[in-house]
Image (spheres, helix red, strand yellow):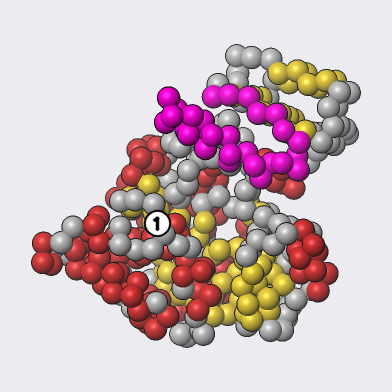
Amino acid sequence: MANQTVALILAGGSGDRFWPISRGDVPKQLLNLVSPGESLLSETVSRVAPLIPREKCFIATSTHLFSQIAKANLVPWENIFTEPSKRNTLGGVLWGLACLIVDRDLEESDTLAVLASDHYIGNSEAFIDLIGTACEIAGNSEKMIMVGIPPSRPETGFGYMEMAELNDSCDRNIVLNFKEKPDFCIAQEYFESGNYLWNSGMFFTSVGTLLKELETCIPEVNKTFLSLIEAMRGVKGQSSEKVFNKLPNESMDSSLLEKSKNLEVLTANFAWDDVGTWTALERIHESNSHGNIVRGNCVVIDSNDCIIQNRHDGMELAVIGLEGIVVVASENGILVCPKEHAQRVKEVPQTIRSRKKSG
């Protein structure tokens, strides 16, 4: 059916950022970091359901995550597309798009909402209103619509977008430049200028517009994409996996969106976080009278401004005399680090894997 809106939810990931409770087969989108009984991915599907029902939600993920996502029964199992290899968000979008075109007869007049699976959204109603607007604009124009988040602090862990002129919430803004994750001093400049938005990574487009933008902005990638569609259709006996592996390992932002001349940004009017590190929990959950975020079976004595998580049901976790520290215990391991080093947690599983390889 033409003129439909479908959601493509990107749900890959290495499971490094929330070690020790995350692993390669349990990345953060499968963890209940925000709501006790619901994973981030489950929240994503539920949140968008008033606008895009589950049967119109499709998940692009890694092969080794298929069984866990299928067992969660969030979408029909045939709506889960497993990528042959890691090719960043560009690969996730193009693999999902190719599957939708070949297997689901997605047409150029249809609208595609590309969403992340690991974000915190503070107001679901405002979120639905905004993405409804984004889908309407995308479906009735040749514009690709992104969502920008007004910065609440000088954050070094997010990408930024510089606006030509920053209007009120939901007004359409033009991007001057995309900025990679800055150091603190530059992030402070962006924050104080009032002319930058955080890049949420969400975007909305008609299928026809996206196909034109691929051809115009990244013609070599587009050739590979067209070959991928041919391979999926069995043309010339090509292997879709081999063709997919020819795609560059790049983000959708840097590969395509930053090159587009048909891009507009809507300003979000809801709380948002990409839940990228353990310290994100203190922006999402209310702390106790000592400034601690505590979960699980914990004994906390004379400690302040800490994130303390016990995800091991059979063990007591005791913390005494600490300040500004992340302490996490699970069956997989124990993490202790200052909050300012939370971005480095991903180094732990990387080091463990390297150590195992070297014997």
Q: Picture quarter containing residue 326?
A: top right
Q: Is residue 123 visible?
A: no
Total numbered labels: 1
Residue lying at 79% horizontally and 73% vertically, measured from the top left: 194
Bin the neighbour count of mark 1 within 10 Å (Cα to Cα): few under 14, some 14-19, many 20 and up.
Answer: many
Q: Residue at x 60, y 14 (%)?
A: 314
Where is residue 70 shown, x and y percent of the image? 36, 41
Residue 179, by quadrant, is bottom right
Q: Is residue 125 left or right of residue 154?
A: left
> Where the C terminus falls, by quadrant?
top left
Under circle 1, the secondary element is loop
Q: Nearer the viewer, residue 207 or 243?
A: 243
Q: What residue type is disc 1 on?
A: Arg
Residue 235 screen position, x and y as percent? 13, 67
Q: Which residue is drawn at the image coordinates 63% and 24% (left, top)?
A: 334
Residue at 52 percent across and 44 percent down: it is 29
Residue 322 left/right relative to 232: right
Against 90, residue 290 (above or below) is above
Find disc 1 in the rendering and name its residue. Answer: 87
Residue 179 belongs to magenta span: no
Q: Where's residue 212, x and y in %? A: 37, 82
Residue 328 falls left or right of residue 118: right
- Residue at the front extreme? 358
Range of magenta residues? 332-359
The quarter of the picture where the N terminus appears is bottom left
Q: Nearer the viewer, residue 220 or 199?
A: 220
Query: In the rendered view, would you say 232 is above or below 71?
Result: below
